[in-house]
Image (spheres, rainbow, N blue to C red):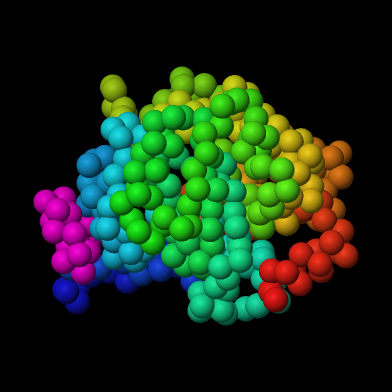
Amino acid sequence: MSDKKRPIPASKQQLHPRNKHLRLYDFDKLRETSPELTAFVKPNKYGNDSINFFDPLAVKALNKALLKQYYRIDYWDIPEEYLCPPIPGRADYIHYLADLLYPEKSSNNTKAYYNERVKCLDIGVGANCIYPIIGSNEYGWSFIGSDVDQTAIANAQLIVNKNERLQSKVTLRLQSDAKQKIKGILQENERVELVICNPPFHASAKEAQAANQRKLTNLKGTPKAKPSLNFGGQSNELWYPGGEKAFLKTLIQESKAFATSCFWFSSLVSKEEYLKFLYDVLRKVGAKEVKTMPMAQGNKTSRIIAWTFLTTKQRKAWEGFLFA
């Protein structure tokens, strides 16, 4: 590899210390693992091998290579126009949740947090099934993945079926009522340690498209007449009536009915100004503890909000089972 290549960019340095993508992508290794990536790799203006991140096919090819190289996934694909997730950011969410479960630990070794007793509910698992893939590989967690989209569930199931290591780790369930988040998914007497959620950001398809137009203009400097979403996304993945605030309000209110069925509920929150509103909703439903964990990747900042209804005594009893 050329010694003229630039040092690790700040966007990588901001990732969680246990994130496998802290360093620049090693395209030599990735192409060796996934030869089909070769057609999309070219030197960028810094002299580093890279891809065109505005090309959906290139992004998908990179994801396939990353998942095979780092997460032992031999088959991965998504239907056209479905969300193609940026893997480093998705991995960060998983790593921060491991920290949440183990507040007394401080290690950069994922093995220190490995626990096959941990079970998660991924609300909106999507066609890509990305959180179960990462969480099961990094920490041994098992997952229930739910979605309102039958095509997404079917494709996620195909990914599970074609990767033997996922078959004992991932159960997929269709949410038949789009107004519900947990109800109809978690069964009676079923418990999970974590609820994971990456909610739709926007209030409408028009708002989602406008946001993408602004992103492309900011990155390239010139607007496009007909912008495309380089990471894809269906309506239920990108927007929800009332936007992210409405989605999370419903999730928080519904979580109260599952107060003793989950140790930590969590969600990504895209905008910091939403936090005051969400804290107020959490106070009203009687959350015992709320934590906020900042995340950053390049110019994009986000955060995880997590809450629990368990008392100190209940948490100790749960931890006794979890860490036995």
Side (left or right) of 207 relative to 105: left
Report x, y in % for residue 168. 46, 58
Report x, y in % for residue 162. 31, 51
Q: Residue at x 48, y 52 (%)?
A: 170
Front residue (pair 303, 170): 170
**In the picture shown, does residue 293 fall above or below 255?**
below
Q: Residue at x 46, y 20 (%)?
A: 206
Side (left or right) of 194 relative to 111: right
Total marks placed: 0
Q: Residue at x 53, y 58 (%)?
A: 142
Side (left or right) of 284 relative to 205: right
Q: Residue at x 63, y 50 (%)?
A: 195
**In the picture shown, does residue 308 fall above or below 273?**
below
Q: Which residues are magenta?
A: 29-50
Q: Is residue 171 magenta?
A: no
**In the picture shown, does residue 102 fall above or below 287?**
below
Report x, y in % for residue 124. 52, 39
In the rendered image, the quadrant that contains the N terminus is bottom left
On the question of residue 316 being in view, the answer is yes
On the question of residue 43 being in view, the answer is no
Report x, y in % for residue 305. 67, 50
In the rendered image, the quadrant that contains the C terminus is bottom right
Front residue (pair 295, 288): 288
**In the picture shown, does residue 234 fall above or below 261?**
above
Q: Is residue 37 magenta?
A: yes
Side (left or right) of 117 relative to 174: right
